[in-house]
Image (cartoon, rainbow, N blue to C red):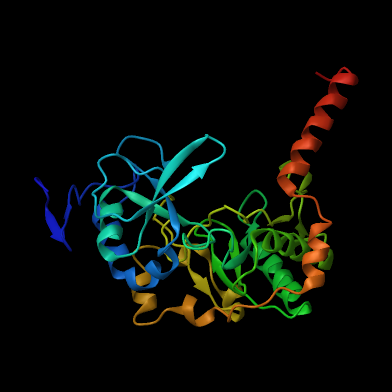
Amino acid sequence: MSGAEETRDGVGLTSLNQPLLAGGDVTKRDLVDYLDAVRERILPGLRDRPLSVIRLLRGQDPFMQKNLPKYTPEWVRRTSVWAEASHRQVSYALCDDRRTLLWFANQRAIEYHPTLSTVADSQHPTHLVLDLDPPEGDAFTAVVGAARLVQRALADVGLAGAVKTSGAKGLHVFVPVAAGTSAEEAAAATRALAGHAERLDPALATTAFIRQDRGGRVFVDATRAGGATVVATYSPRVRPGLPVSFPVAWDDLDAVSPADFTVRTVPALLADTDPWAEAMPAPQRLPDDLVAEGRTIPVARVQAMHEGKRRARARRESGGG
């Protein structure tokens, strides 16, 4: 590539000393160096999965890129997926190797959001995910408490999961599922588990999808299912200092803060280890009764849409606008 300041694995790298975020001291070189340093840990979670990235171009707002741009090198592996919402084929990248990861880093792709299923078996997710979202303000201790509820809910039905920071203010609990688990079964089980966690401590946790109904409680989000994506373990986030989504042992949750894990601190914390791979249980078969229970629980987004329409109609009928 003409104008490249450095070349790694055949990828020309440019503008490496440019700051990534306005007013911050993290540079594009910091991003490239970080992703290169952790490539053996992050790539297993990206490989063979349609990938969306969040890019941050100089002077612009962050944006999510799903469809690969026309200038993408031909050696970047890709897959075509029909997007029902936009009624078009979307060409997703498959980030399988160091070269592709470096190319994305040079494109100022900061966040990496793979699907929960692989391109070879798109109807069968490999994991359930419960996304724990704090109420307004800095309430990580509350999120940790909600994660404990999820851990108990899992144990109560004979399941186990691994936990990581989201890289923002929340936590993600991943539960690996047996091969052949359908997207519908996984989604139902996720809803049921969220409901179990909520019932363990309804003053702390809620499954209310509508934000104003959460009442300062941690949202146990069961909607990361089907074609949803989740930020990859070890992925940076577009936030000051570039925090990283990082695995935490269940016993260590009370002793950490999401700010502990950044592109500058994580390589040294990892050394030669891969705590996410070490923490992940073997794939598990979902209990039939858990799936059956989940099928009786409405899909949160659909329920919220209907509730929103009902409330709007009630306001109109009462003369409230």
259 is higher (above) or lower (below) than 276: above
Residue drawn at point x = 79 percent, y = 36 percent: 306
Q: Residue at x 12, y 48 (%)?
A: 1
Q: Relative to the observer, which residue lies in front, 305 or 204? A: 305
Question: Residue at (82%, 59%) from the top-left corner?
Answer: 203
Residue 114, position in %: x, y? 47, 57
Occupied quadrant, residue 253: bottom right
Q: Is residue 302 above or below residue 320?
A: below
Closest to the observer: 2 or 69? 69
Q: Quadrant of the C terminus?
A: top right
- x and y, in percent, of residue 268 in the image: 34, 75
Q: Quadrant of residue 65?
A: top left
Q: Nearer the viewer, residue 126 or 108?
A: 126
User: Is residue 38 among the parts visible in the rendering?
Assistant: no
x%, y% of residue 77?
Answer: 32, 56
Does residue 157 appear in this view? yes
Left or right, 92 with respect to 124, comes to left
